[in-house]
Amino acid sequence: MPLPLPLAAPMSRTFRSPIIAAKEWVEGVSFPADRPLINVSQAAPIAAPPLALRKEIARMAVEDIEAHIYGPVLGLPALRSEIANQWSAAYHAKIEASEVAITSGCNQAFTAVMSTIAAPGDEVILPTPWYFNHKMWCDMSGVHAVPLATGDDLLPDLEAAARLITPRTRAIVLITPNNPGGVEYPAELLTKFYALAREHRISLVLDETYRDFDSRSEVPHHLFRQPDWHDTLVHLYSFSKAFRLTGHRVGALIASPDRLTQVEKYLDTIAICPNQIGQRAALWGMQNLSQWVAGERAEILDRRAAIYEGFPTLAAKGWNLLGCGAFFAYVEHPFAMPSSELAPWLVKHASILLLPGASFMPEGDARAERQLRIAFANIDRDGIHDLFTRLAQIAP
């Protein structure tokens, strides 16, 4: 019998993606016609981009020869400039195109910039519940993810974070609106975390993938207005959510030009350049689809409202809504069954696919087994009502 091929230790310690693992729970399961599967496991839109954008993508594919060859490693100059201009207006600050890089999705933006920040043996602070892909990158890179426990409001505590900083700490990573918790971080809290990171000469990596679906009308933070902000701040973004460009893999990061010079080394090694058609689609969307995106935002905010309006049905059964916003509701269930068992049980007994809290928490954290994440980006008000009705009826 042949010996198994050796596997690098950091990769062997990295857990599988919960999204991939959860898909196996539905294999071979038949769902009744009157109780079809409600899939609230993943936030990525399953619908195609709007028709106008798809037509433009088709035109590009036929007419734009440069869309089929290598482009600049840091991205299409026109798209970098458009992001700089629109972000400058949105944040009431001045952002230069030279401070913007385009990546193959926001996950690549994170891995690219973190590869310039942290090396094996270093530490990165991640609030819990955390985004599992951030933890996975730490594990496979030999970087220690230091959990920063949040309270019942799912907001990270500044003093608790300060106590976790050591000589090996290289960054604090925050996500707002949050994945998986949905909460929107107050601007004042972000300013305090920025000051903490700057004081300790570490990076503040701010993932704003869901910024287009923030319920607030005011500027979400003032970090780009801080003097020499790029000595501390790194901003991450994704076009997957706003324009439904999930399959085209277009993301962005904003940082100092010096850091982007280092990021360029990583990107040139990993992908050479971002998807050329995807970049052009993102640029066209930014220039032509602002009203459409506003409508998408209004729809998501209405679904968020439906979560709040319908949750008393579950609260009466002992459920607790910990956070809700963007594409997510993060809840606490009342059952003795741990969520790592409850989540696959729900597939067979309630035709519901969602993720357990263990997907977003350190191993052994008892809170994880009481928590579940509901990603409601792909279900409407009626779907939310059906989801809550089923959850209110279960008795595992």
Image: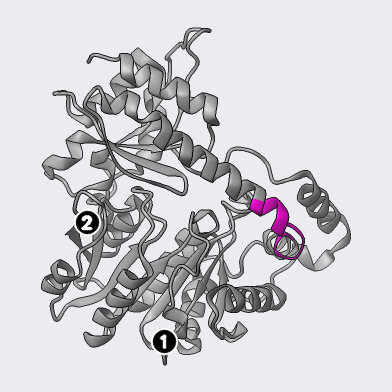
Residue at 42% of width from left, 23% of height from top? 387
Sequence-wise, the earlier of marks 2 and 1 is: 2
Q: Seen in the image, is 219 located left or right of residue 365?
A: right
Name the image quarter holding the N terminus: top left
Q: Is residue 269 left or right of residue 308?
A: right
- For the residue pair 65 and 301, the one nearer the viewer reads as 301
Residue 279: x, y in percent? 68, 64
Residue 278 in the image: x percent, y percent? 68, 59
The residue range painted magenta reads: 285-294
Q: 10 Å neighbourhood of mark 2: few (<14), some, or many (≥20)?
A: few
- The part of the image, by quadrant, that contains residue 150 is bottom left
Q: Is residue 224 above or below residue 7?
A: below
Q: Which residue is tagged 1?
A: 226
Q: Which residue is mark 2?
A: 9
Q: Residue at x 54, y 44 (%)?
A: 300
Q: Which residue of the protein is positioned furthest toward the right in this rendering?
A: 63
Residue 287 is inside the magenta segment: yes
Query: Residue shown at 44%/84% (left/top)?
Result: 259
Which sits in the foreground, 246 or 374?
374
Q: How far is the residue under mark 2 from the one under mark 1?
A: 41 Å
